[in-house]
Image (cartoon, rainbow, N blue to C red):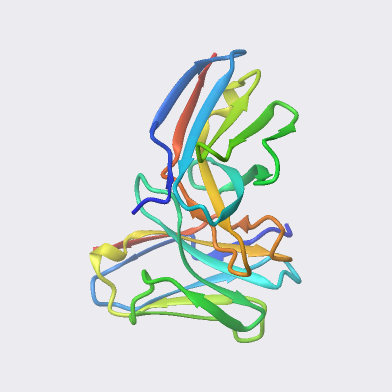
Amino acid sequence: DQQVKQNSPSLSVQEGRISILNCDYTNSMFDYFLWYKKYPAEGPTFLISISSIKDKNEDGRFTVFLNKSAKHLSLHIVPSQPGDSAVYFCAALPSGSARQLTFGSGTQLTVLP
Amino acid sequence: DTGVSQNPRHKITKRGQNVTFRCDPISEHNRLYWYRQTLGQGPEFLTYFQNEAQLEKSRLLSDRFSAERPKGSFSTLEIQRTEQGDSAMYLCASQDRPTDTQYFGPGTRLTVL
């Protein structure tokens, strides 16, 4: 039972355009959401996060939107750059003391020059 | 380099052999997590430690798996009697406080022949 779903395995975008990566979750106990970026042969690198009390968080070219009623979040990258090409994982944390991340299956973003 | 380190980076073993991986977290990080990532999937939680105490174990962690963090610093993950299904990337992450970001190491890629 996948509690965090990324339904698009891959996405290709032209350099300079917007990249939108989507993520859905099913567990209402999740109260904190993160995006990680992963290059080949490296571990995931934290990108941006959002608490369930917010609906938007912005950091430079990266913005995460959270729609709690729809149990949906998205990552926007504007403008996209070739160096953004990587696998992007959506992850969620439950409320309470247990803080293990639950990850989606990832979306391979390719930014074309 | 003050990041999370993992050794070895790659391990090839024959079915039935025992293997041990090591993780050195960021200095003074209290929490240490182990995850496993198989091809096409996101990382899946295995277990975590707060200091030297192992506080939670996933159902994925069969009795062939054992993890230790004897002095609350580095951790080891041992797999006994390896099976081909154990082939995966094993990731370690460390965290200072429960509300902080988890920082991942580069992972150990295990191949069981």
B43 vs B2, nearest the viewer: B43
Q: Is residue A104 left or right of residue B64?
A: right
Q: Is residue A43 visible?
A: no
B14 vs B47, nearest the viewer: B47
Q: Quadrant of the N terminus of chain A?
A: bottom left
A22 vs B30, nearest the viewer: A22
Q: Residue at x 62, y 33 (%)?
A: A65
Q: Is residue B23 above or below residue A81?
A: below
Q: Is residue B12 visible?
A: yes
Q: Quadrant of the C terminus of chain A?
A: top right
Q: Position of residue B93 (x, y in %)?
A: 59, 62
Q: Is residue B53 above or below residue B15?
A: below
Q: Residue furthest front?
A: A69
Q: Position of residue B61 (x, y in %)?
A: 38, 73
Q: Position of residue A90 (x, y in %)?
A: 52, 43
Q: Position of residue A13 (x, y in %)?
A: 50, 17
Q: Residue at x 75, y 28 (%)?
A: A60
Q: Residue at x 73, y 32 (%)?
A: A58
**Which quadrant would residue B49 be assigned to in this image?**
bottom right
Q: Residue at x 49, y 59 (%)?
A: B9
Instruction: Please give the count of numbered marks on the rendered protein.
Output: 0
B78 vs B46, nearest the viewer: B46
